[in-house]
Amino acid sequence: MKYSSKHIGGKYLKLLYKGKAKNVYEIDEETVLIEFRDDITAMDGKKKSELKGKGELNAKISAKLFEVIEKRGIETHYIKFEEPNKIYAKKVEIVPVEVICRNIATGSLVRRYPFKDGTELKKPIVEFCLKSDEFHDPMINEDIAEALGIANGEELKKMKEITLKVNDVLKRFLIERGIILVDFKLEFGRFNNKLLVADEISPDTCRFWDAETREVMDKDRFRKDMGSVLEYYKEVARRVL
Ligand code: TMP
Ligand code: ASP
């Protein structure tokens, strides 16, 4: 990883990590500043674009949703929001596992298994995937995670438990705002021997459908070239903030 720095708020900060849609800057030993960029990608980074204002919307939506789950006792990396498109967060060691939770069958679930698109699942499905564009985020189990040395069984169990709690809290919060939480992806970070919900919770990492019309309000609009991506992100922000 090439290091560089950035002049932010009168200080030069070291760029620790540049992801597909976020930059992570070092504040101190225990703290980072995460900048949400306007870049949007799909198909493991192969499809790319830029949407002016998306970074700001995702930073705001993420900050709010982290606050909502923190209030319900779920520990996250989130510290505070910084106008217009950043959050301060604890400097965690990211576990390279994507934890996916689904309430309605769609997306890759209906491509891989004989579920009917759009049907409500009797109980949420949780999947663990390896965070790797190169290998297309393959589904993994406890044995694979342990053999790869990325997480142990106990950690996976804990991540699943926290994910289901996040699902309960967010599902309720969103439906009151006319949004169905179809599915979402969480990442976790290790910090002082604890697992914290990390990364972001936004229309880039969740599927949100309008509760009345079932209109798509998330990154599927970009993945499937449905148009008006930013307009729907704005509508999510309007309802959530
Ligand atoms: P999927 O149906 O494509 O497996 O996606 C499930 C959920 O995970 C959906 O809300 C989008 C989210 N997701 C990410 O945030 N990052 C990814 O790399 C992938 C594949 C999905
Ligand atoms: N996050 C992945 C990418 O940026 C895939 C996706 O979200 O569809 O390529």
Image: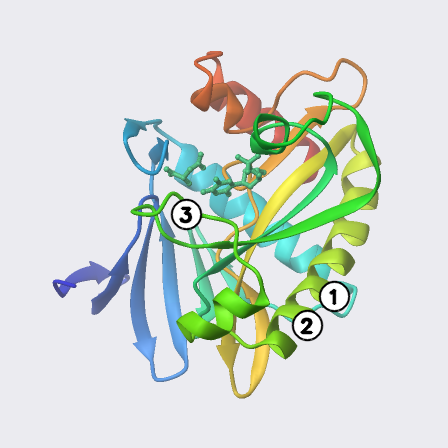
Name the amino acid, label 3. Answer: Asn
Residue for badge 2: 158
Q: Do residues under tags 2 and 1 come within 8 Å of each other at their CB atoms?
A: yes
Q: On the rendered image, what quadrant is the N terminus found in?
A: bottom left
Residue at the disc numbered 3: 85
In this view of the protein, which residue sits in the foreground, 150 or 103? 150
The answer to whether residue 157 is left or right of residue 221 is: right
Label 2, label 3: how far apart the Cα atoms are:
30 Å
Q: Mark 1 highlights which residue?
A: 161
Looking at the rendered structure, the secondary structure element under dot 2 is helix
Residue located 58% across and 75% down the image: 195
What residue appears at the point 70 percent right and 41 percent down from the top-left corner? 102
Residue 109 image point, x, y percent: 62, 33
Disc 1: CA contacts within 10 A as few (<14), some (14-19) or many (>=20):
few
Mark 2 C-beta closer than 8 Å to ligand 1: no
Circle 2 Cα neighbour tier, 10 Å, few/some/many (<14 / 14–19 / ≥20): few
